[in-house]
Amino acid sequence: MTDSTANPAGEPAPIAPSEMTLDELREALAPVLPMHAAFDGWGEAALAQAADELGVPADRARLAFPGGAIDMIDAWFASIDAEMAVRAPAPMLRARKVRDRITRLIAARLDAMEIHREALRRALAILAMPQNAPRAARLGWRAADGMWRLAGDTAVDLSFYTKRLTLAGVYAATLLVFVDDQTENFADTRAFLDRRIAGVMRFEKLKAQLKPDPDRMFSPVRFLGRLRYPAS
């Protein structure tokens, strides 16, 4: 007996937009939204046009984004996270140095957004609003965490957090250069990114050199032990 939901290749047939859950609909609309947000902003008009393109009622599309513009931007950035993993998969990165892995991952994100720079500009303006600062911080953290995980980071100590905070700052600054870059092949953006990554690498190297030697650090336990058991 054959499965009517499968195509000839044996793969599941695509779900019709009218049959999608709200999560599935949000994921389907996410990459379509920036094409319309570039002209109409991240609002009802862009969402209605994206919904029409998918063939779903605008009212149902609105249910997928209860938070309005900020939810639409969140969904688009999530689609960029997914596309980054396709453009720069972990196996391809393994042979590179850590610095090159991170540079390649940011470049993959920029490449994915290249045709949507006006939508990105509008999105960054919304995220810069004071009331959206917590959401903007979470999106920056999510992007940085995704990049470090693809780069193979296995840190579990304090550096897990410092790496992501630092990368989130580099990425955010690079986006601000990217949206206004008029140079060929975004040369200014790539040069800026290289400088920022180089600066981070120098800082990490210096931090490693200045890291205290555990054997030379004051230890209350060792001190009390020597009081109790003085060296002969």
Image (cartoon, helix red, strand yellow):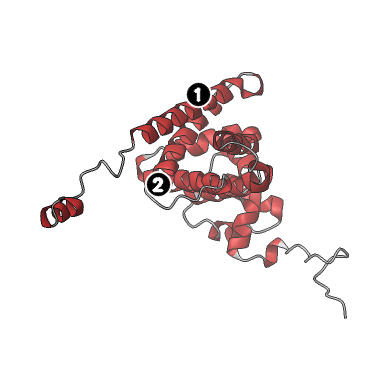
Q: Position of residue 4 (x, y in %)?
A: 83, 73
Using the image, determine if residue 178 lies above or below residue 43: above
Q: Where is residue 150 in the image (x, y as percent from the top left)?
A: 58, 47
Decide which of 103, 8 is in the foreground and name it. Answer: 103
Q: Residue furthest bottom?
A: 1
Any part of residue 58 in sight: no
Q: Position of residue 205 (x, y in %)?
A: 43, 31
Using the image, determine if residue 57 lies above or below residue 41: below
Using the image, determine if residue 153 lies above or below residue 103: below
Decide which of 102, 185 is in the foreground and name it. Answer: 102
Q: Quadrant of residue 191?
A: top right
Q: Which residue lies furthest to the top in this view?
A: 183
Mark 1 packing: few (<14 Cα in 10 Å), some, or many (20+)? few
Any part of residue 211 in sight: yes
Decide which of 219, 184 is in the foreground and name it. Answer: 219
The residue carrying mark 2 is: 161
Tag on residue 195?
A: 1
Mark 2 packing: few (<14 Cα in 10 Å), some, or many (20+)? some
Relative to 28, is 159 on the left or the right? left
- The residue shown at (59%, 32%) is 117
Q: How far apart are marks 2 and 1 (CA)?
A: 22 Å
Q: Position of residue 59 (x, y in %)?
A: 58, 59
Helix, strand or loop under label 1: helix
Q: Quadrant of residue 207?
A: top left
Determine whether label 2 and label 1 are within 8 Å by CB.
no
Q: Quadrant of the N terminus?
A: bottom right
Q: Which residue lies furthest to the left in this view?
A: 227
Relative to 190, is 7 on the left or the right? right
Decide which of 38, 229 is in the foreground and name it. Answer: 229
Helix, strand or loop under label 2: helix
Q: Which amino acid does label 1 sit on?
A: Arg
